Amino acid sequence: MMKITAMTKKKNSLKRKLVEESIDVDALRFLKYRVSEKYSTERNLFLKRDASKENGLIVTNVPAFLGEDVVLAFINKISPNTEIEDSFVQRSNAADNSLTNGQITVSITFVKPESVNEILCKCQNVGPYTASDFAELDFPTVLKETTSLYCRLFPSEEQIQEMAETYIERYDQDLADARREAKKKYSEPDEDGWITVTRNKKAAKAVKLKKDEIPLIGGLGNPKKRKVDLAFYTFQAKKDKQQKAQELLKKFEDDKKRIAQLKQSRNFKPM
């Protein structure tokens, strides 16, 4: 009985070796999956041996909402006896390098190098796995993205108040630190042992002026208020023109009388 069991194990190991020899484990492999029963379109994760270490595996084309935990669950589903030493998210193809957007790359390190070959040999012959069976997914939708964008562009009144208080506190703290540094600078000696001494400027004295000197310096006296007549209606403008014409005519008549008086008072002395 023991001989039969040993022969069976030997045959299985030979079959495994033949399968591994027929598959190029250094090539890019894929694993089929789908998001959920509702979103049942088949997708692919790409798997490749990590060239930097023999017991490392690189998994790419992983949606950010899928996450590292679901990828590890897929690996454990492929080979339940595989022992994983370490795993981490290596990078993202998002424009801002955010690990919550775009597609991420997961690096997995196994305890044994043989586990990498086993995963690469089996990955294309299993699946598609359903991601929602392993974790509760929070995949993005247009509504979620629009709501998130709106909240970022238009914060609530409480958020604005909190941001304002935080800014004021930070400004006061920076101002206090600057004053403390300035005080420290003028109270402690420098490298050569010198202390900078400063003297405050004296306040300017008040200058007393006489009343008749004020207009000469800047016209600080009470200036005469000029009356500005603004005609609002048409008849007011016409009336203003007539009044100005009468004033000019009266001035002209006064000038004629004054000239006539000057001529009469002139003394004629021919000799």
Image (cartoon, rainbow, N blue to C red):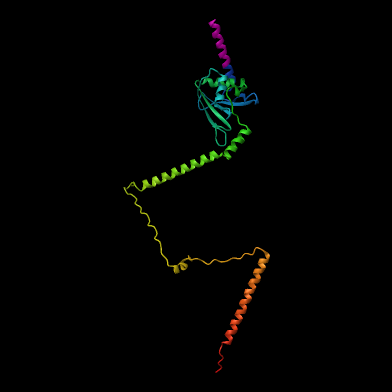
Q: How many marks?
A: 0
Residue 117 placed where, x, y %? 55, 21
Q: Quadrant of residue 106?
A: top right
Q: Is residue 270 above or below residue 181?
A: below
| Residue at position x 57%, y 13% in the image | 12
Q: Is residue 100 left or right of residue 220?
A: right
Residue interval drawn in magenta? 1-16
227 or 7: nearer the viewer? 227
Q: Residue furthest left?
A: 193
Q: Quadrant of residue 199?
A: bottom left
Q: Would residue 28 be counted in the magenta stretch?
A: no
| Residue at position x 56%, y 6% in the image | 4
Q: Residue furthest top?
A: 1
Quadrant of the image for the N terminus? top right
Residue 105 placed where, x, y %? 55, 29
Q: Is residue 195 left or right of residue 265?
A: left
Q: Would residue 3 be counted in the magenta stretch?
A: yes
86 or 139: nearer the viewer? 139
- State the predominant SS element of the stretch in magenta: helix
246 or 69: nearer the viewer? 246
230 or 121: nearer the viewer? 230
Quadrant of the image for the C terminus? bottom right
Residue 265 placed where, x, y %? 56, 87
Residue 56 placed where, x, y %? 52, 25
